[in-house]
Amino acid sequence: MPFTCLRCGRCCLNTEMPLTEDDVRRLERLGYRGFYELRDGLLRLKNVDGHCFFYDPKSRTCRVYPDRPEGCRVYPFIYVEGVGVTVDPECSAAYTATEEDVARAAPKVLRLLRKLGVLGRKRF
C-alpha cells in the first residue's frame, strides 16, 4: 500500500518549504501575494502565526492544495546529504512509507532539488 497522508497538518507548522519560481508564478497567477520570503538564498513559504501562509488552522487544510508548491507535493520525501532520498521522521505518517514509495518519490525529489539549485549545497 502506498504512503498515506494522515492530513494532520504537522508539516504545515513552522514550515521552511522552499519554492520554485514556477510555484511563485502559479500562486501569484491565482491572486496570492506576500506568501513567500527570501531566506538562506531560497524563496520559502512564509509562516503566519506559526503555520504556512496557506494553511487554514480551523479546517486543518491547505487553501491551495490543488496548486500547492512542488515541495509540498513530494513531502514527506526529503533529501538528506550523505543518505539520499528518505522519509522525514518528523512526518506523523512516516511509518506508512515503504521502500517502494521512497524509490518512486526519489526522481521527483531530485528534480525539485535541481530546479532549486540546491544539490551539493551544505544547507537548504
Image (cartoon, rainbow, N blue to C red):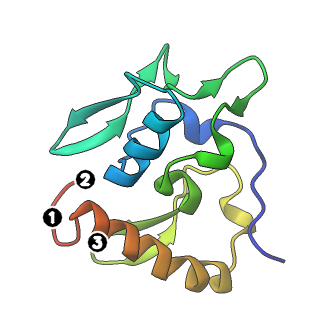
Q: Looking at the image, is 100 positioned above or below residue 48?
A: below
How many neighbours does mark 1 have within 10 angstroms: few (below 14), some (14-19), or many (20 or more)? few
Looking at the picture, which amino acid does disc 1 mark? Arg
How many neighbours does mark 2 have within 10 angstroms: few (below 14), some (14-19), or many (20 or more)? some
> What residue occupies the far right of the structure in this picture?
1
Closest to the observer: 26 or 80?
26
Q: CA distance from mark 2 to mark 3?
A: 12 Å
Tell me whether circle 2 and circle 3 mark residues in contact (CB < 8 Å): no
Location of residue 101 (image quadrant): bottom right
Looking at the picture, which amino acid does disc 2 mark? Phe
Residue tagged by mark 3?
114
| In the image: residue 88, left or right of residue 37 | right
How many neighbours does mark 3 have within 10 angstroms: few (below 14), some (14-19), or many (20 or more)? few
Residue tagged by mark 2?
124
Q: CA distance from mark 2 to mark 1?
A: 7 Å
Tell me whether circle 2 and circle 1 mark residues in contact (CB < 8 Å): yes
Residue tagged by mark 1?
121
Instruction: Check disc 1 and report its element: helix, strand or loop.
Output: loop
| In the image: residue 64, left or right of residue 17 | right
